[in-house]
Amino acid sequence: MSENIVDVKNMTKQYGRQLALDDVSFGIKKGSIVGLIGPNGAGKSTIMKIMGGLVFPTSGSLKMFGESSEKGLNHSRSRTSFMIETPYAKADMSARENLEKQRRQKGIPDKGRIDEVLKIVKLEDTGKKEVKKFSLGMKQRLGIANALLGKPELMVLDEPINGLDPEGIVEIRELLRNLNKEEKVTIIISSHILSELSQLCTDYIFINHGKITDTLTAEELSQECSEYYHIDTDNNELASSILTKDCGINKLEVLEDGSMRIYEGFDDMRRISKALYEGGVIPIQLARNEVNLEDYYMKKVQADV
Amino acid sequence: MYNIIRSLNFTNRRNMAILLTIISMITLPLLIPMFVLNVPFKDITGGAYFTNLCGELFTIWIFPIMIISCIAASADAGDKTIYYEIMAGHSRSRIFFARIISALVWGVLLCAVTFYLPLVYYGFINGWPVEGIKISDIILRCLLSLLPMFRIAAFCIMVSVVFRSAGKGIGFSYLFIEVEVLIIEITSEFIKTLDKTYLSGLYNVMDLLTLDNSRNFVINGEKVDVYETAVSGKYALMTIAISLIIGGIYLTVAYLDFTKRDRN
């Protein structure tokens, strides 16, 4: 059984009258890459801020690296790196100066570590350029460099690929994958780019309105993310009736625009097409697809609504 | 805590506002006597600088104290780089005290050194010939003035910590101190002069740096000013006690806000 590196139990956070987290419980296994998924305002950043010590929970408990006392949690935080919301930096200082400030603050004796992390995130040639002149992507890279500075065992990253170009996204994905595989770094990551998370994560936590709505592993997700046929016709209502009554399709989902998804009968598509045609329905689209993380997420969100 | 102070010193040394303030603090004592008071350089003795200028000049020096102590305490709160200190596992208490030490060293000691430095170099270059001024009394007055300066800095630190912004800290501190001075001036008829100096850190410093009891004599046809420089024991003790108590209250409020409030 894998050891949990983070344990959150019955955590609630209230800002005034607003309930940001409502009795949230979950565990993070050591060595995993966990995707924290939810819409804006769902409570993702609040969870990360509580882990980082920026926000105090109203009730509930947090355990990191087996420590739950205030002193113990502070010690755990020294083994963790955080990048929450936007990367914070001194706008009138260079990337190197910003990292030097953090190196001193964290008490990292090795000055050469700054060159290493600048090289990893490809900011080694920025020289004395002030951070205020950086693009969003460069600032994001600086945030990641900062997170890597102390050789953390756990990384908590809020939207780390926000603002990066496609090449940058691939690089950061590979970097995180390597850190996880080679250095055994556990990663908690939130992103709105779900296709990226699906390529990286080993586990997923879905959160909405401050509540955990689902937790599942990548294997469980792949089972959920089954294949389907997307069918759009000139008369979807009639088509739906033909599919259920004449073709015996039970796993049918009607989408908002009226088009349909069928999750069975893939070997019998010739008969289904024929039945539709003979029933007076002209198929406009008949395509084989796969439910991905985005579809799964949308389904979850809609179910909550 | 040592690591945080090192990190803060690294940032403060690179802060343009602090740099410009320090340059101003070094050049003003050279420029004001010559260009504002129209006194030739050779006539600005150490004693003349103290008796004629120090008290009034402090009304300008309150700005460097405000600017530097607010920046040292809370500039990182404005751009949220302070989050990294919390997230790195330093306790909030340690982060707070590191900032207080940095803000007091940069905001009080540095400002006091640049404020009193002209006494030294004008004294060395042009001498110290003001009758009746005891150097030991002046040193005592200068040392005592550090305490109300601490009280002023503590107030600015509190405001900047509560507002989580150096800029707001400077602005609101200035506003509050101006209002305080205005209220004291309006009500000064009803309160004793002695009380007035305790009500405000600014007045307390100005009072310490102003020699009121001067007498004019003509000796051998030459006009001579003679000052009484001694500070009464009661006044010294009250200055120490009130500065430490009120400054301590300001820092306690800042501490509670810093350690108990969410960083959102």
Image (spheres, coloured by chain):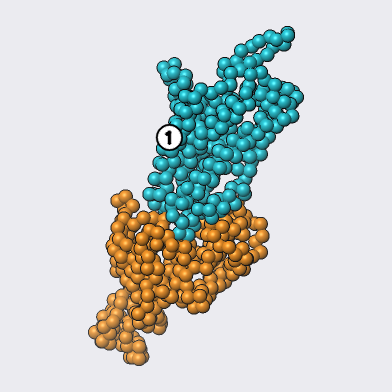
Element marked by disc 1: helix
Does residue A278 appear in the picture of this structure?
Answer: no
Q: Residue at x 32, y 62 (%)?
A: A61
In this view, the residue in front, B234 or A53, is: B234
Kind of residue indicated by mark 1: Ile
Indicate the quadrant where residue A290 lies: bottom left
Instruction: Establish if A45 lies above or below B149.
Output: below
Residue A100 placement, left or right of A239: right
Q: Colour of chain B?
A: cyan
Up the image or down, A219 lies above or below A55; here it is: below
Q: Position of residue A139 (x, y in %)?
A: 56, 60
Q: In the rendered image of this protein, which colour is used for chain A?
A: orange
Task: Kindly tell me whether residue B219 is visible in this rendering.
Answer: yes
B86 and B232: which is toward the camera? B232
Hey, which quadrant is residue A6 in on the image?
bottom left
Q: Position of residue B133 (x, y in %)?
A: 63, 21
Chain ID of residue with mark 1: B
Residue A214 versus residue A94 in the image, above or below: below
Q: Which residue is mark 1?
A: B245
